[in-house]
Every structure is written in C-alpha cells, then in structure tokens.
Image (spheres, helix red, strand yellow):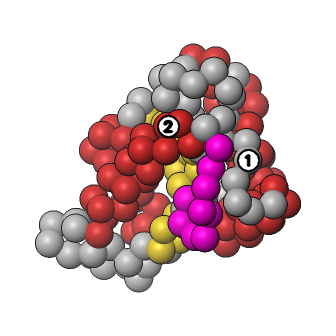
Amino acid sequence: MKVYLAGYISGSKIKECIEWRKKVREYYDNWKGERYPIEWLDPLNGEIEKISPDGLDCSLPGKALVHRDFCSVKVADLIIANLDTFGEPRPSVGTTYELAWAWYLKKPVVMITTDDNYINHPFVKDTVSKFVKDVDELLESKIVNYFFKGQVTANY
C-alpha cells in the first residue's frame, strides 16, 4: 500500500512540516513490534536543498514539484492531508490541488483539520473519507489500518 502525506510546506515552519509526517511514518514502522508494509510518499522526501521561508520557492523548478506531486497522488492508495498551516497566514494551495487530484483519481482521503471552513464546505465534506482533528486522533482511529487491511489478503 502507498500512502501520500499531503500538507503545508514552509521554510519557516519546516520542523513542523516534517514532524507530523515523521510521527505517522514512525508509528506504522513500529506497529506492535512489526513494520506495516506501507510505502510513504512524501513531498519533503528528495533532493530539495532549500525551501524559502514562505514555502513558495525552492531549489527545484515549480513545474518539477507539481509534476512529481501529481505522480505521487496518482500512484497512492490513500491520501492523508494535513490542513494545518502552523500559524502561517498563507493558505495551503498545493494541498488543495492534491485534494482535487485525489477526488478526480478516486483516491480516499483522510483529512487532518479542526477548521469548520473545511469540514463544512461541500467540496470537502462530501469528498473526504474521514476527518480527524490531529495526528494523534489519526493514529488512534486506526483508519490507515482499515484501508490497509482492505487491500491485503483476507485473514480471519
């Protein structure tokens, strides 16, 4: 199973942008002493040498980022989209695109947000498989497990 970790990217908040993704990956890499065979697709994985404080410029051309992220969404079996901007005023435009691609490609989405503007928006509430308020709730809900087990050999 392949899971894409969509979410805000900003050079000034890079620690937070990496931290939540790392927490999810480590949880499933150490699941009850075993590793879930999940391939993590992460836009922060790769050869990005620098990201500007506002997250709008980096060492790669914009088209390369867009095309790579689209390919990641396309091959993913599940999208986890974190809409937290970590206090930054800039909206998460890239993640919004990834959500649109996920809908077009019929990919399930689990969204991390407490923002009622997303939760109650018809373009979001009717396309997201599950809403959770934070990474801890994501992990406690075992929704990733649910999607994973739906794609592996049945074991009763």
Q: Is residue 68 left or right of residue 23?
A: right
The x, y position of residue 115, in whole percent, is: 54, 20
**How many residues crowd around disc 1 within 10 Å: few (fewer than 14), some, or many (20 or more)?**
some
- Residue annotated with mark 2: 13
**How many residues crowd around disc 2 within 10 Å: few (fewer than 14), some, or many (20 or more)?**
some
Q: Quadrant of residue 124?
A: top right
Query: Is 147 or 61 nearer to us in this picture?
Result: 61
Q: CA distance from mark 1 to mark 2?
A: 14 Å
Q: Is residue 76 left or right of residue 17?
A: right
| Residue in the image at 39% along x and 34% along y | 134
Range covered by the magenta-colored residues? 44-52
Q: Secondary structure at mark 1?
A: loop
- Residue annotated with mark 1: 57
The x, y position of residue 138, in whole percent, is: 37, 44
**Magenta stretch holds residue 51:** yes
Q: Is residue 106 above or below residue 93?
A: below
Q: Quadrant of residue 81?
A: top right
Query: Can residue 69 be seen at all in this image of the molecule?
Result: yes
Taking the view exactly as shown, the residue that stands out farthest to the left is 33
- Kind of residue indicated by mark 2: Lys
- Kind of residue indicated by mark 1: Asp
Q: Is residue 96 above or below residue 28?
A: above
| Residue in the image at 40% along x and 69% along y | 149
| Residue in the image at 22% along x and 67% along y | 30
Discs 1, 2 touching: Cβ within 8 Å: no
Picture quarter with the C terminus:
bottom left
Disc 1 or 2, which lies upstream in sequence? 2
The x, y position of residue 109, in whole percent, is: 59, 49
